[in-house]
Structures are given as structure tokens and as C-alpha cells.
Amino acid sequence: MIRSFSLLLLLVSTLAAEPVDWIWTARWVVTMDAQRHVYDHGAVAIRGERIVAVGPQSRIDRDFQPKHRLAIDGILSPGFINTHTHAAMSLFRGIADDLRLQDWLQNYIFPAEAKNVTRDFVRWGTRLACLEMALSGTTTYTDMYYFEETVAEATKEAGLRGVLGQTIISFPVADYKTPQAALAGTEAFLQRFQNDSLITPAPAPHALYTNSDESIKAARALANKYKVPLIIHVDETKKEHEDTLNARKMTPVKVLDSIGAFNGRTVAAHAVWVDDADIQILKARGVGVAHNPSSNMKLASGVAPLLKFFSAGINVGLGTDGVAGSNNDHDLMEEMDLAAKLQKVTSMDPRSVNAYQALEMATIGGARVLGLDAQIGSLEAGKRADIIAIRTDQPHAAPLYNVYSQIVYALKASDVRDVMVNGQVIVRDRKMQTLDSAAVLKKAAEYQEKVAASLLKK
């Protein structure tokens, strides 16, 4: 009789449970929500593209009946958000290292692009970047490059989320020969991917020093018309800062503000040489900063004033930048580690940028920069199901006392085991489910030969 009653209770409980597509469970669930909830033996329930519930595993198992389960004796986290890169440049990985930015751009990158970049190059370079990003836990990335509609196609094919900026620049490049043609192409790109579930299209004037004021104003108008961000490099190097001061008697931030470039959502990449007045402008205009510690260090561009950004209440995300020499990988876990340590050593204060703040920049902070924080960046009911599972069963991950410091200072990109974006599992047990990894790597090897041969030609 007791056994029958127990079975009846179990049956009633099962019938009352709400159906979902997935339940992911882990030893720790790091939500990055406003209350900083971390669930010991927690779970996430997912239906379709969205998270239905997050909490203790006992409660999630009681309330929901899944079609599929995934369990890890590790960590569940929001997917990482890369707020600045040039994905297709993955095929230029390491062609020009140990150089200053202007030398790197003018004498190596721009010539290499002129000889090699085609729509096919961009497609395969983006696939390579998406493969690397997905396997290292990045679920959303922000791009600036050429043939951006092709970048969008490859990104959707991979199942990643992208805020993708079509480059507008003053000289002829692979896709458009004039800024006017680039602006027209940008509008077509914005129209094509408007309201896409994975792609946010955006205009991306390369920088103040590579565009006319008129082109930047036109890009701003397009961004506002289609309610998308404008993406731009801002005050990255001392040379850029001083050249602008000498030519226009204002800093790059003040020039951009004076022409209305910040009158709408803006993602400012780098912002290394900004002064206190510039920071107040960025705050007043709601500009988000994409901080690129590896790139700024490798190019000796300087150290962005993160502590001042935080003090002013400016939203800051992390970026890898491109991997052609300004950085050589798309590893957001490395950027978290470096972002924290770089501020500590320059401020001479080990309390500067703690582990929580570093992870925040890679998740909900990056979402705020992109204006997507209502949709992604934390594990909360109603948000898009962008989730990563990280293993903690390797020597470098044991023991674990603080989950934030473990993610930022101890764990590696290779510890990411499973990845879900928009409710779709795109990495399962470290195997990419949406791209043919072997084909991507084979094509990368073919392009290596082509690019290397092109560099020998005068």
C-alpha cells in the first residue's frame, strides 16, 4: 500500500511537471544576475530559444520534465561575449607580429588584405573564427570587417550570435571602393538582417582617422534609422590621440562628439588614451567601451583606464581584437585574466578589477555594451538560452574555493565542454555540431599557402 501510494505521488508529480526541451545541471550555476546568485548543485531549464527557470537542481527537477538532459560536475555560466574583433582576419593569424599599430596596419595588414580578401576568404575566415570562439565559450561576438553579409551567413551557419559591423572606410577595399558605396551596402545589409534572431547588423566606420566627418555622420544616421549600434575604433594609440589634437585642437572623443557620432548607441573599441573630460562625454552619451587588453599590450598601445570607466559608470565589455598580430587568438578566458592583472600591475593595487568584475565584463557587462542585456549576458528566466558548461576535473582546476576566481584565473578555454546558443547545442563534449571542423582547418591550410605566396610578391 505504501509503495503504491509513493508511486502515485511520483506519477502525479511527473504529470504536473512542465515540459521543457532541456535541463542542464552542474555542481555550480553562475548566473551573473543582479543578485549574483550562484547555485550549488543548480540547474537551468530551457524551452525553445529561452531559459524557463534557473535554481537549485531539486526544484528544477521537481517542476520540469525535459526531453533532453545535460549534466556536468563543473560550472554552468552565461556564454562569453566578445565585444570587438575582426573574425575573418583569422586567416591572417600571425602574419605580422611585434609591430606598432600604424606600421602593422599600413605596411602589412592593408596590403595583405588588398591582395587576398575576397568573399570566399571572408566566409572561411569567419568559419575558422566561429569554430575557435565556440570551442572556447564565446556565444556572441562583435565584428567589424568586409563582406559583412557573408560574415552573417557564416555566423548563422555556426549557430553563434553576432553584432556585425559593415566597415566604412575612406579608401578602396575588398568589398566597396568608396565610402558612399559602403554606406549604400551597409543599408542593404541592415535591411536584410533586420529582426534576425541571431544577427544584429550595424554600421562600422573604421575610425575617425580613416573616415571623413560626413561618412561618420551618415553611418550614425543609418544606425539610428534601424535602431542598431554604431561600432568604431576610438583613441586607440598615442599617435592617433596626438595627431587629432594637432590637426583639430580636440581629442578624438571630443571630435566625434562634436559631429554627433555618439548620438545613439555606440560601441567604442579600445578608448585607451581618453582623458577625464572624454570619460564624462562617454558617460553622458551612454557609449559602451570594448576593452582589448591583449591587443593593447601586444601593440604597446597603452592601458585603458578601466578604474575610471567603472567609477564613471561606463559599461565595459571585453574584446580579443583581430588575430592577425594585434592578438593571435579569440580566447575570452585569457582576456579576463589579463584585464584583471593588467589593471593590478599598472595601479599597483592587487584589489583593482577583481575576478567578479572580470567575468562581468565578459558576460553581462558585454551585453550592456551591445544593448542586449535584456536578452543575454546572464542566466535568468526569459532570457535567450546562451549557456556554456565548463569542466573542473583537471589538475589546474582543483581544488575550487571561489567559482569566480577559478573561472578567471585558473580555468582555460579548453575546459569549455558544451555550448548552447539560442537554445541550440552547437558544441557537445568539445565537438562542434554545426561546422565541419576538418573542412575548416583544411581550408585554413590552403589559404595559408595563398597568403604566404602573396606576401612574396611586390
Image: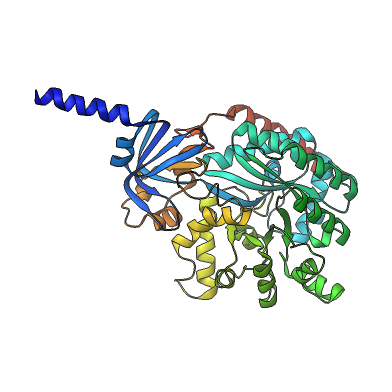
Picture quadrant of residue 134:
top right
Query: With 16 as the anchor, is 53 left or right in this view?
Result: right
State the residue at coordinates (26%, 27%): 12
Most extreme residue toward the left is 1
Quadrant holding the N terminus: top left
Query: With 92 as the anchor, is 441 left or right in this view?
Result: left
Decide: is 100 above or below 226: below
Decide: is 311 above or below 130: below
The residue lying toward the viewer, choosing from 389 and 190, is 190
Residue 126 in view here: yes
The percent coordinates of residue 44 (x first, y second) are: 40, 40
Residue 456 in view here: no
State the residue at coordinates (83%, 48%): 111
Picture quadrant of residue 147:
top right
Picture quadrant of residue 351:
bottom left
Query: With 306 as the anchor, is 123 left or right in this view?
Result: right
The percent coordinates of residue 14 (x first, y second) are: 29, 28
The percent coordinates of residue 56 (x first, y second) are: 32, 45
The percent coordinates of residue 297 (x first, y second) are: 62, 62
State the residue at coordinates (44%, 60%): 356
Quadrant holding the C terminus: top right
The residue lying toward the viewer, choosing from 137 and 442, is 137
